[in-house]
Amino acid sequence: MRTFLDFLKSKTFLIHLGLAFLALILLCFLVLRWLKSTTNHGDFVVVPDFSKMAVMEMRETAEKAGLRYEVLDSTNYNPEYPRFSILEQNPPAGTKVKENRKIYFTVNPSGYKKVTIPRIIQVTRRNATSMLRAVGLDVQRVTYIDELGKDMVYYIKYKGKEVNPGDKLPKTSKVELICGNGTIPGNAVIKAESGD
């Protein structure tokens, strides 16, 4: 035990301890210098505003700025933006980032996603209108025909053509409801004939 304590007090041990301490300081200094050079410490790139840019233009701009990118699909069509243009970006424009940072982009699809026409035949006009609005469709017009069921939906038309429940239309499409007016079909003709 005494020899170990003597060794800790010896000149050789103190020299080795000093050398180890100096080596540790030198190693820390070199690691910090290496990190500073490889991470471009203090060097930033300001993220450009990619809003409404076409995808090809976005790619060129990102590469010139030294940024990487990833394009994410979007299901929400925005009619105020051109088709296949940038809707959103993360991080946002003006943010300072390191060179080679990945920017995530959400792209405007080519149009509204399609929705399924609900089963509204033999449903009242009021309920049919609510069901259509719930899926993202609008009633542009209601036309009445001679049918016994007053305000009952008999047909659905889109751009003048008959469509059926289960068919798909672009979201926000406007449809026409063909409803009954409460008159028995052919009744008006019979009355006209009986009136002669």
Image: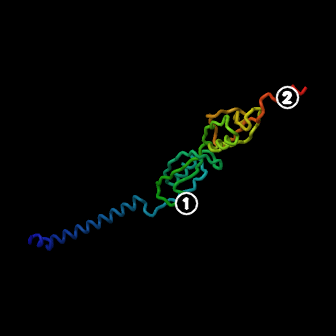
Q: Amino acid at mark 2?
A: Lys
Quarter holding the C terminus? top right
The structure's colour scheme is rainbow
On the picture, is 144 further left or further right than 20? right
- Disc 1 target residue: 94
On the picture, is 48 further left or further right than 173? left
Q: Secondary structure at mark 2?
A: helix
Give me the residue at 29% from left, 67% from top.
25
Q: Position of residue 73 (x, y in %)?
A: 54, 45
Q: Nearer the viewer, mark 1 or mark 2?
A: 2
Q: Secondary structure at mark 1?
A: loop
Q: Nearer the viewer, residue 35 or 8?
A: 8
Look at the numbered discs 1 and 2 and tell me whether their residues touch, using CB distance below 8 Å.
Answer: no
The mark that comes first in sequence, 1 or 2, is 1
Quarter holding the N terminus? bottom left
Q: Amino acid at mark 1?
A: Gly
